[in-house]
Image (cartoon, grey):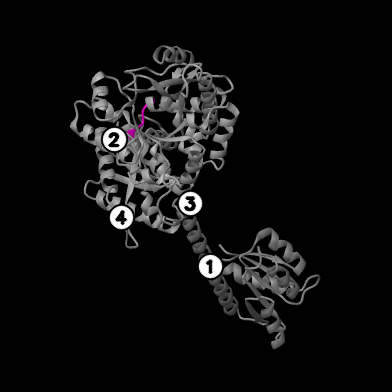
Amino acid sequence: MNKILIIEDDSIMREIIQQILDIDGFSTITAENGWQGLQMIEQYQPDLIICDVMMPRLDGYSLIQTLRQNPITATIPFIFLTAKVERCDLRQAMELGADDYLTKPFEAPELLQAIKTQLKKRQTVTQHYINQIQRLENESIYLARHDSLTDLPNQLFLEEHFNKIRFQVYSQCQILPLLLIDIDILPRNKLFFGTNLKHLFIKALVKRLNYEDLLNNSINLIAHLKTDQLAISLKPIQNIKMVGDIAQEILDNLAQPLFINNQEVFMQARIGIACYPNDGLQLSQLLTYAEFALEHYQPEDTRLYHFYSQEILDIFFRKVILETDLHYALDRNEFQLYYQPQVNAITGKVICVEALIRWKHPEYGMIPPAEFIPIAEESGFIIPLGEWILKTACTQIQTLQSVVNNLNIAVNISACQLKTANFSEKIMEIITETGIAPELLELELTETIFIQDIESVKQKLTALSNQGIKISIDDFGTGYSSFKYLQEFSFHNLKIERYFISNIDHFKNKQALVKSIIQTADNLKLNIIAEGVETKKELDWLINNNCEIVQGYFFSPPLSIEELKKFLSRNNS
């Protein structure tokens, strides 16, 4: 029932108006002057006001002016009912914000029609506002649940979807798989990709995945996360083996190029998988565990999807512990250097030793370099660790020059170290500090240097080479290099990766490749060194094919500095 406030100083007129409205079914309240009316408006918030103009304490014009300045009361319909009939009075009332203006004497139907018209108008306006608010609320809900750039469902949408179905999945003893997809656009395509194009790419990719899924209908929802990863909620299943099959189908799909703005875009994807309820009961847990499964990927893996497992979690926590402990290991003297000799197979003399880092962890024991070096590179700790290795190796080998004259020392250098602006200066500083002759130092670099700024790398290596330092390419034939780089850089040695040497006497394809490397090195006047020589047959094949410098367990395992001194005394005496 609509509530109407009647403000009239004439008590008889006030009662007449009240009776008319009561008979017509309206709820009424009354006030005898403007001041009292203002108080009742604040207290009751009426749906419409009927007001006289001339009243004591606060007249009608002053009252409406006050109401229209207050946002709470500004939209209440206001009808003047007055004996003032001059046109100027009407204009003044309307200019102040009145919705209608009736003059006394009045007819009841006229008053009722004016009231109904204003109430209907108010209802229309109110409904319009309600619709606007509802639309804004819907937009707000949509925006909160969709990525603003790709318009794809986001993590909140995914979580609400997950919570709606998880109890049903649990009660029916089903599995709800969550696939977290990491997509990497191949380097040659990244040059053409700004932020806008990347979002177009993601939308096109999801569209294709949804279209292809029409055939087997296995995808429930695809969401785009803030991490720029895709999360796919599959439909509930009974057999977990099906999840691997679906993941492989998705990977096969993603292996196909997309066309964005007439540009063919190639990508590489990896998938981490976690399943409800086996791996976790909350979406946040599943996303975290799927991320662990993603991080577990290794370059040598033949499969590009991994299921989360407790083993993966243990590996992750071990990595976290090692990363923390790495930063204290130098101060605690937990690192040790071992040296593996490089031998001239014809004379049997040691001409160089390679410094190899070992970490004796107080809890885990000896940690292999293949485990802690990548952690050191990711965390940046490889910079101080690399300096310690170089300085320690130069210092220790300097003490052996009395045992073997001109004994060379080979030290591995990380691509991360090479990126530092003062790399060349730091090397020369260590040489000066340790007193080793520059021509006795060999820096071993892997082929990953070729994915850096080639000109910057070339300048640094040339500067060091001009000082007499030798530059070697380690694990040649396994990385990014092509033979053309061998002419552009100041290299001295090529080290053939142990994979190609292992059982080389049995494999013709290995023999052909190694012969090609040896021939190339000879043409470029580079020394060739074979790593990983473990048998007499391997050694004989290498000697017969003009590779005379070898390194491997056939001659010696890595030795401590004390063991190396004894080995050199026996071998080079």
Question: x%, y% of residue 25?
Answer: 56, 66
Q: Nearer the viewer, mark 4 or mark 3?
A: 4
In the image, is residue 267 above or below residue 385?
below
Task: Examine the image and state in which quarter residue 553 appears.
Answer: top left
Chain-order first, disc 2 or disc 1:
1
Identify the residue under disc 2: 518
In the image, is residue 243 above or below residue 537?
below
Amino acid type for the residue under numbered disc 1: Gln
- For label 2, the SS is helix
Name the residue located 56 percent from the left edge and 69 percent from the top edge: 122
The residues bearing labels 2 and 1 have C-alpha atoms spaced at a distance of 92 Å
| Towards the viewer: 464 or 6 | 464
Amino acid type for the residue under numbered disc 3: Ala
- Rate crowding at label 3 as few (under 14), some (14 to 19) or many (20 or more) other CA atoms within 10 Å: some
Identify the residue under disc 1: 123
Q: Is residue 568 magenta?
A: no
The residues bearing labels 4 and 3 have C-alpha atoms spaced at a distance of 29 Å
The residues bearing labels 1 and 4 have C-alpha atoms spaced at a distance of 53 Å
Identify the residue under disc 4: 258
Task: Examine the image and state in which quarter residue 277 appears.
Answer: top left
Amino acid type for the residue under numbered disc 4: Leu
Amino acid type for the residue under numbered disc 2: Ile
Chain-order first, disc 1 or disc 4:
1
Q: Is residue 146 left or right of residue 344?
A: right
In which quadrant will I find the C terminus? top left
Identify the residue under disc 3: 144
First to last magenta residue range: 306-310
